[in-house]
Amino acid sequence: MNTVTVKNLLRVLLDTNILISAVVFGGKPDEVLSLALEGKFGVVISPILSVELLDVVNKKFPLSKNDFRLLERQLKSTFEIVNPTESIDILKDTADNRVLEAAIEGKCDYIVTGDKELLRLKVFEGVKIVTAERFLDELKIED
């Protein structure tokens, strides 16, 4: 069930590493996340990616129970949740394949990631795969 429907906006999948970098370290990933939270573009996530994000945050960067619940609520209220129906198995890392599946199911325009294997693809089935810095540059061009 989608809690948010993204219509007529640029559709973007923010990889888990970008979301964690945004929350923990700031920088360009945080700029990207801030724009998403402002509604400048639509963000897509799948249940598998959501669980991965919450699991990594909980294990590596423990939050208080209240902050953790707030993060969960923010995900559900801001991101469109898609359930991929197509299975992709082109990359060595299974988690990277799950990112591609969610982006395809969510009809995304971009995947924003720091993952080198994903970035090497550059484009997958019409979805541009870029770093946070490159995405911000491309947003400026499209404005």
Image: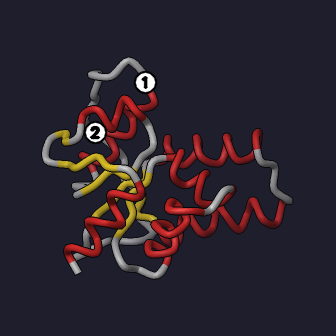
Q: Which of the marked residues, 2 or 1, is nearer the chain's N terminus?
A: 2
Is 72 rendered above or below residue 86? below
Q: Residue at x 42, y 46 (%)?
A: 113
Q: Quadrant of the N terminus?
A: bottom left
**Which percent across, then down, holds residue 54?**
65, 48
- Judged from this view, the residue extending furthest toward the left is 126
Q: Nearer the viewer, mark 2 or mark 1?
A: 1
Secondary element under disc 1, as helix, strand or loop, is helix
Which residue is labeled 1 in the image? 94
Percent x, y for residue 66? 82, 66
Please report the residue visible at 55 percent of the width from the left and 65 percent of the height from the top: 30
Q: Identify the image's colour scheme: rainbow, by chain, secondary structure or one colour.
A: secondary structure
As drawn, the residue found furthest toward the right would be: 64
In 3D space, how far apart are the residues under numbered discs 2 and 1 (Cα atoms)? 16 Å
Q: Residue at x 75, y 59 (%)?
A: 68
| Image-quadrant location for residue 32 | bottom left
The residue type indicated by label 1 comes to Thr
Query: Which of the two residues, 120 or 82, is positioned nearer the viewer here?
Result: 120
Establish if 117 lies above or below 106: above
Q: Is residue 50 positioned above or below 10 on the image?
A: above
- Disc 2 element: loop
Q: Which residue is mark 2?
A: 85
Q: Quadrant of the C terminus?
A: bottom left
Q: Residues within 10 Å of mark 2 (few under 14, many from 20)?
A: few
- Label 1: how many residues lie within 10 Å, few (<14), some (14-19) or many (20+)? few
Residue at image coords 34%, 35%: 118
* Residue 19: image location, x then y, percent: 55, 55
